[in-house]
Amino acid sequence: MLLKKRDLSDCQALYSLLTHPDVFPFIRHKPNSYEEFLFMTKQTIEAEERGEMISRTIVDERDRPIGTINLYDIENGAGFLGTWLGKPYHGKGYNILAKELFFEELFFVQNMETVLLRIRLENIRSQKAAEKIPYVTLANQSRPSFYKAINENPSGYRYNLYEITKDAYSLYYKKNNAQVQGPIHPLEA
């Protein structure tokens, strides 16, 4: 499994996966049609070129698109994480692998300092997944301004806020990848 830069050629496969009722309610931007998803993906690619976000397609061992992972609202070395996987890929370990690859790029290549996760209270699957990650901390109290901001939204959704710092991830990475040699290189287009 690996990550690759977003490409319009992956949109058909991704759209068929994101429309599943176990996935669609929890994605950030909800397209009403394939054409709208195509347009949104084009906007995503352009936003990355402007430095506003970082977005990758998650692919399986056969190079098939299975989801996306994104860092939104980048400001001052921090941003909000958004990840989704197609239903057939839930519970198979892709989520944590995608996150670790993405965090390597974010912290060691893109020089980000903080990744924030907002997870809706009713999204128990995502909360449990986040809480299994050893370098994630619940940040409802340590980041009160962010916590307040994400819970003051027009939709009325309630969220928990989680945080991953570069220091926490770096420590985890060093402990678990002592045998890795050489620098980490940015993804090729």
Image: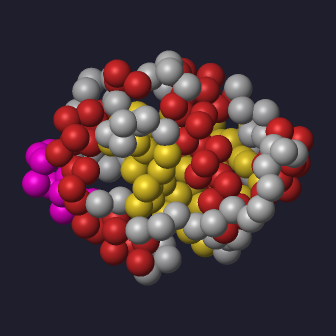
In the figure, is residue 60 to the left or right of 110?
left
Residue 91, position in %: x, y?
50, 19
For image coordinates 48% across by 73% down, the residue present is 52
In the figure, is residue 114 to the left or right of 90?
right
Residue 137, position in %: x, y?
77, 39
Q: Is residue 1 above or below residue 23?
A: below
Q: Is residue 2 above or below residue 23?
A: below
Name the quarter where the C terminus is drawn. bottom left
Q: Is residue 16 above or below residue 129?
A: below
**Which portion, as a residue range, is magenta?**
32-41
Residue 16, located in which quarter of the rendered image? top left
Q: Specify whether residue 12 is in view.
A: yes
Residue 12, position in %: x, y?
17, 45
Q: Specify whether residue 26 is in view.
A: no
Residue 74, located in which quarter of the rendered image? bottom right
Q: Main secondary structure of the magenta part?
A: helix
For image coordinates 67% across by 74% down, the residue present is 76
Q: Does 35 lie within the magenta span?
A: yes
